[in-house]
């Protein structure tokens, strides 16, 4: 039996999502942009899904833009915010980003700063994994046009104080759009509440039991969204391309199921996570828990092991049937030092982080297997 403890990377498709998708994968056809009856049926399915997703994310249907996932949603948000600033007045001259963002935000913000010549301020986090609010407030000057702070960190699982971030942005940088990447939040938190103060919110279906390859950008109010992808003018000319009908319908069903079962799942998974982390801390003297557990989502267990390279540890765990990650993989699959741990002041441990992420399918047997395998693997590497 394999223990799948990499739910923060992707989580199994929920049966509700699969059931909703099957008609659109097994014979029912229709391009929602067309005029005939099959096209109109597909459009109704997309519209119904849009309304459901909007309700669950605390948005209106017109504020929902379907994308290919969280990465595109983040890129579209950064592009939209910086393009709009240049179109409506002086070009953006300052951008603010937390240093613990996902690469989809970090690289998009870097590119936007280079394109516009803007000053880019990177805000560190504390050892607890929470963004430094004082540093953020200092960075929020009147010329800032975009502030990006994620809802939940993808590596260490800490829930960021979005409401306090929004207060600082509104008070000090009133021109700025606030982008909240809520990709890791959606399985565990009410995004409508947590990311409610944000102007731009990104989510991805495969993190909460939907299919891969589909996501959402919420663009609140009348905020303009200049498209990254141009063509047929779909999504109200905000994102061109034929909509992924099956994926969109599956995402809506998965988000509904995740929302309805969230409280019970979080309580069950948090108990398993606590047993896993406490057991590893007791069994491995060199292990340290990363961040403040009381401020993490239920599914995140992140530890560092002094003197151990995470890449070597992951190979041994894989051989022993435990799927895990460091949370810092690049496209080639090789591990890079964690920019998140570095931003938290843990640079000396930036290559030793192990992320064991639990989800809606995680069982006690999978945790038991990890409690057996991880100490053995660390001991082998320490010999």
Image: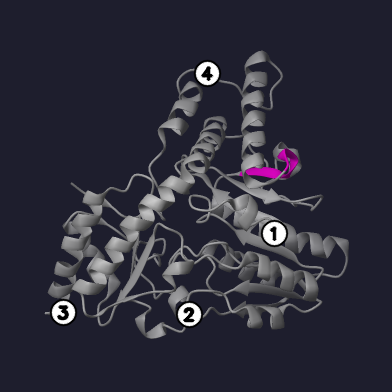
Q: Residue at x 66, y 24 (%)?
A: 44
Q: Which residues are magenta?
A: 60-66
Q: Which of disc 1 and disc 2 is earlier in sequence?
A: 1
Q: Secondary structure at mark 4?
A: loop
Q: Is residue 81 above or below residue 375?
A: above
Q: State the image coordinates of residue 161 (x, y, percent, origin top left).
A: 60, 68
Q: Which residue is mark 1?
A: 198
Q: Which of disc 3 and disc 2 is earlier in sequence?
A: 2
Q: Which of disc 1 and disc 3 is earlier in sequence?
A: 1
Nearer the camera: disc 1 or disc 4: 1
101 sits left or right of 227 in the view: left
Instruction: Give the alpha-carbon distance from disc 3 to disc 1, as whole Å.
Output: 46 Å
- Mark 4–mark 3 contact, CB under 8 Å? no
- Mark 4–mark 2 contact, CB under 8 Å? no
Q: Which residue is mark 2?
A: 344
Q: Quadrant of residue 139?
A: bottom right
The scheme the figure's colours follow is one colour
83 sits left or right of 193 in the view: right
């Amino acid at each position: 039996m394999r223990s799948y403890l990499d739910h923060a990377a992707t989580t199994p498709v929920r049966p509700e999502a699969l059931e909703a998708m099957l008609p659109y994968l097994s014979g029912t056809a229709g391009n929602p942009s067309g005029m005939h009856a099959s096209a109109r049926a597909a459009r109704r399915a997309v519209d119904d899904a849009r309304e459901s997703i909007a309700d669950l994310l605390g948005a209106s249907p017109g504020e929902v833009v379907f994308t290919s996932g969280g990465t595109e949603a983040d890129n579209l948000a950064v592009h939209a915010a910086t393009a709009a600033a240049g179109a409506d007045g002086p070009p953006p001259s300052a951008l603010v980003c937390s240093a613990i963002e996902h690469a989809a935000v970090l690289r998009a913000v870097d590119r936007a700063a280079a394109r516009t010549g803007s000053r880019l301020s990177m805000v560190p986090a504390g050892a607890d994994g929470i963004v430094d609010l004082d540093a953020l407030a200092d960075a929020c000057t009147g010329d800032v046009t975009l502030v990006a702070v994620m809802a939940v960190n993808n590596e260490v699982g800490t829930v960021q104080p979005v409401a306090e971030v929004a207060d600082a942005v509104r008070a000090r940088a009133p021109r700025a759009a606030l982008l909240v990447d809520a990709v890791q939040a959606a399985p565990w938190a009410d995004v409508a509440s947590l990311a409610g103060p944000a102007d731009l919110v990104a989510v991805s279906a495969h993190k909460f039991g939907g299919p891969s390859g589909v996501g959402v950008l919420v663009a609140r109010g009348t905020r303009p969204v200049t498209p990254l992808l141009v063509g047929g003018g779909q999504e109200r000319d905000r994102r061109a391309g034929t909509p992924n009908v099956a994926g969109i319908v599956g995402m809506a069903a998965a988000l509904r199921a995740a929302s309805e079962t969230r409280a019970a799942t979080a309580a069950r998974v948090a108990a398993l996570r606590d047993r896993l982390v406490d057991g590893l801390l007791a069994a491995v003297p060199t292990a340290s828990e990363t961040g403040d557990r009381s401020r993490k989502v239920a599914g995140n267990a992140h530890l560092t092991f002094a003197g151990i390279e995470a890449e070597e540890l992951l190979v041994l765990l894989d051989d022993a049937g435990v799927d895990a990650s460091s949370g810092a993989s690049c496209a080639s699959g090789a591990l890079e030092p964690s920019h998140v741990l570095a931003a938290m002041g843990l640079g000396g441990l930036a290559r030793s982080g192990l992320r064991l992420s639990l989800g809606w399918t995680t069982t006690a047997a999978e945790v038991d297997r990890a409690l057996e395998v991880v100490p053995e693997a660390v001991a082998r590497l320490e010999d």
